[in-house]
């Protein structure tokens, strides 16, 4: 009985950890998207202020 309970607890912990990792991964993806959008907008604003042809410059 002791080993079975430990196995169940370990499985429960692994499932919970996987859910937490999945949620953290999703949040990181959301953050990266927002960060990329922010950087793109910031580049465009700075280019406009400096009157640079941003379209002619290859940016990733």
Image (cartoon, helix red, strand yellow):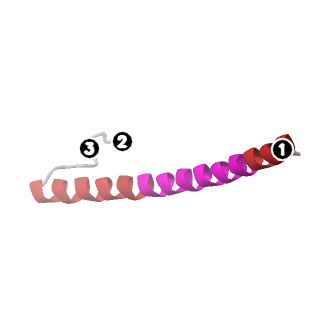
Q: Which residues are magenta?
A: 12-32
Question: Which one is earlier in the sequence, the residue at label 3 or at label 1?
Answer: 1
Q: Quadrant of the N terminus?
A: top right
Local secondary structure at mark 2: loop
Q: Residue furthest left?
A: 50
48 displayed left or right of 26: left
Secondary structure mostly seen in the magenta stretch: helix
Q: Residue furthest front?
A: 2
Query: Label 2 vs label 3: CA separation?
Result: 12 Å
Look at discs 3 and 1 and give the one toward the viewer. 1
Residue at (58, 56) in percent of width and height: 23
Q: Residues within 10 Å of mark 1 (few under 14, many from 20)?
A: few
Query: Label 1 vs label 2: CA separation?
Result: 56 Å
Question: Residue beneath label 3, please?
Answer: 56
Question: Residue beneath label 1, please?
Answer: 2
**Position in image of residue 43 (x %, y %):** 24, 53
Q: Nearer the viewer, residue 28 or 1?
A: 1
**Position in image of residue 10 (x %, y %):** 74, 44
Residue 13 drawn in magenta: yes
Q: Quadrant of the C terminus?
A: top left
Question: Which one is earlier in the sequence, the residue at label 1 or at label 2?
Answer: 1
Q: Nearer the viewer, residue 12 or 46?
A: 12
Residue 29 drawn in magenta: yes
Question: Residue beneath label 2, please?
Answer: 60
């Amino acid at each position: 009985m002791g080993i079975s309970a430990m196995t169940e607890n370990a499985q429960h912990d692994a499932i919970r950890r996987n859910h937490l990792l999945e949620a953290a991964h999703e949040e990181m993806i959301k953050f990266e998207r927002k960060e990329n959008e922010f950087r793109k907008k910031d580049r465009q604003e700075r280019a406009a202020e400096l009157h640079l042809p941003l379209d002619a410059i290859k940016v990733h």
